[in-house]
Image: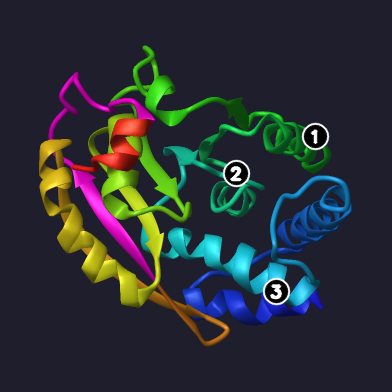
Amino acid sequence: MLREKLVSGAPALGLRLGGEQLSLFETYARELEEYGKNVNLTAITGEDDIAVLHFLDSLSIAAAVPLAGRSMIDVGTGAGFPGLPLRIYESGLRLTLLDSAQKKVDFLDALCGKLGLEDVDCRCGRAEELSRQSGNRDSFDYAVSRAVAQLRVLCELCLPFVRPGGTFIAMKTPESAGRELGEASAAVGELGGKFERFFDYETDGIARTLVMITKIAPTPGKYPRRFSRIKNDPL
């Protein structure tokens, strides 16, 4: 059962979930599966897998950094991961969920209403465009992404959102984290970042790694480029 998986798995991350939080996660899982019958939101289904591969995996970030009173943008959030589980865990997190697919943003809007999280900002748009707008650029404490893309691509999409002194957090496998960081070293520096550390964790025996990059200077105005350039000619 989902509740039991969360109760047993959270302490391994140094976290504790209360009854209200667990109820919200149960509602989240029900809505995810119900909405997913008509809209392709995620390939992960079933209570146990949702609990471990979506909810606990997302909550790893709460074990790595403080969230209360911070602002976060989740780039390429899809069905809300990792941002929304973090907002359920920490009510003091100011959260923006960003995805380019309107159907997923519609789901998130409806879900946040059912969860009573009406202060979550759900936006449909492209990261490379929104990060150039006033109020978005160099302004968030954290940018996070669980998107399946090369780290050097994610850096150009995410670091422009982060304020100097803030952190970009990318969720990777242990096998890919070091290799992708090596490939992204030039991009990190060019975009105003500096590698901080890896945060390794396990959820139900599955090893994962957070790549944490601190923003030490504003991102140069020429970045991010158009997505076709980012994808075909990464920094």
Residue 49: image tag: 3
Q: Residue at x 19, y 21 (%)?
A: 222
**Left or right of 69, for residue 204:** right
Marks 2 and 1, how far apart in space?
18 Å
First in sequence, mark 1 or 3: give its number: 3
Marks 1 and 3, how far apart in space?
23 Å
First in sequence, mark 2 or 3: give its number: 3
Residue in front for this viewpoint, 44 or 61: 44
* The magenta stretch spans residue 210: yes
Residue in front for this viewpoint, 117 or 122: 122
Q: Does dot 1 land on a helix, a strand or a loop?
A: helix
- Residue found farthest to the top: 134
Q: Residue at x 56, y 52 (%)?
A: 86
Q: Residue at x 30, y 41 (%)?
A: 232
- The location of residue 172, given as percent across then percent down, is 39, 65
- Residue found farthest to the front: 232
Q: Residues within 10 Å of mark 2 (few under 14, many from 20)?
A: some
Q: Three-letter amino acid code at disc 2?
A: Ser
Q: Which residue is mark 1?
A: 110
Q: For the N terminus, which image quadrant?
A: bottom right
Q: Which residue is mark 2?
A: 91
Q: Which residues are magenta?
A: 209-227
Q: Residues within 10 Å of mark 1 (few under 14, many from 20)?
A: few
Q: Three-letter amino acid code at disc 1?
A: Ala
First in sequence, mark 2 or 1: give its number: 2
Q: Nearer the viewer, mark 2 or mark 3?
A: 3
Q: Residue at x 37, y 55 (%)?
A: 170
